[in-house]
Amino acid sequence: MKPGEEIGERENSFLPKVVNASGETIDSCYQCRKCSAGCPVAYAMDILPHQIIRHIQYGHREKVLSCRTIWICASCYTCGVRCPNKVNIAGIMDTLRNMAINAGGKFGEKNVPVFHSVFLDAIKKGGRVYELGLIVQLKAKTREFLKDTALGWKMFRRGKIRLLPPPFSSKKEIREIFNVCEKGKRG
Ligand code: SF4
Ligand code: SF4
């Protein structure tokens, strides 16, 4: 293997895996960059959406799964709407996030994956978001206890953060939804 070459450049198994998991025709991308030009959070990404597609085509698995971009994407679907080849990049980003979690490596973005897991946990337990519980969990996991405290206090004073969790009576239904999703992920 040449220096700088990634596994997959000679034998690209990454592209078909992403195509199969996402159901997207990644091969049809001809790098017009309309996706990146319209992405509202491109400024915060380390690899632009059209570059992500190119890296997948080249089989650069490590680079793609360890970048910030897949966690920064807000799943707004602007890119997919603008794409002349109807490549649904938001769906591809979902697939890449799952692949990154399953690969168990180091994430390119520290706090967003933690937020995802805390958020899902909150929905699983309470059926909807209970902001105060979510904030406490997030702070405990990220250890950023002082970050955004002024904003949190302001929200609390304006009644945006409740002290008690909202009532929840659909535990069984929520559990069933999670069971189906988790079964699908394993299958
Ligand atoms: S808009 Fe579509 S075809 Fe153009 S670069 Fe993005 S994914 Fe590729
Ligand atoms: S779905 Fe993601 S990549 Fe596409 S425009 Fe929205 S934020 Fe950008």
Image: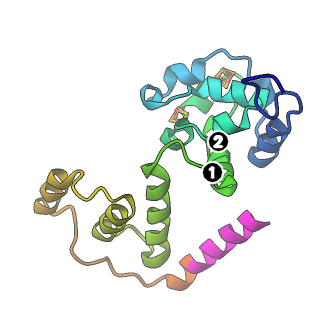
Instruction: Tell me if residue 17 comes above or below residue 35 in the rendering.
Output: below
Which sits earlier in the primary sequence, circle 2 or circle 1?
A: 2
- Counting from the top left corner in percent of width and height, residue 86 is at 70, 29
Three-letter amino acid code of the residue under disc 2: Leu
Q: How many marks?
A: 2
Q: Residue at x 72, y 37 (%)?
A: 61
Three-letter amino acid code of the residue under disc 1: Gly
Q: Are marks 2 and 1 in contact (CB under 8 Å)?
A: yes
For residue 140: magenta?
Answer: no
Q: Which residue is mark 2?
A: 65
Q: Quadrant where the C terminus lies? A: bottom right
Quick one: label 1, few (<14), some, or many (20+) residues within 10 Å? few
- Span of residues in magenta: 175-187
- Counting from the top left corner in percent of width and height, residue 10 is at 88, 28
Furthest-top residue in view?
32
Q: Residue at x 62, y 32 (%)?
A: 80
Q: Provide the secondary structure element on which disc 2 rests.
A: helix
Instruction: Tell me if residue 111 comes above or below residue 1 in the rendering.
Output: below
Q: Which residue is mark 1?
A: 105
State left or right for residue 33 relative to residue 162. right
Residue 126 visible (yes or no): yes
Q: Residue at x 22, y 70 (%)?
A: 162
Instruction: Tell me if residue 21 comes above or below residue 33 in the rendering.
Output: below
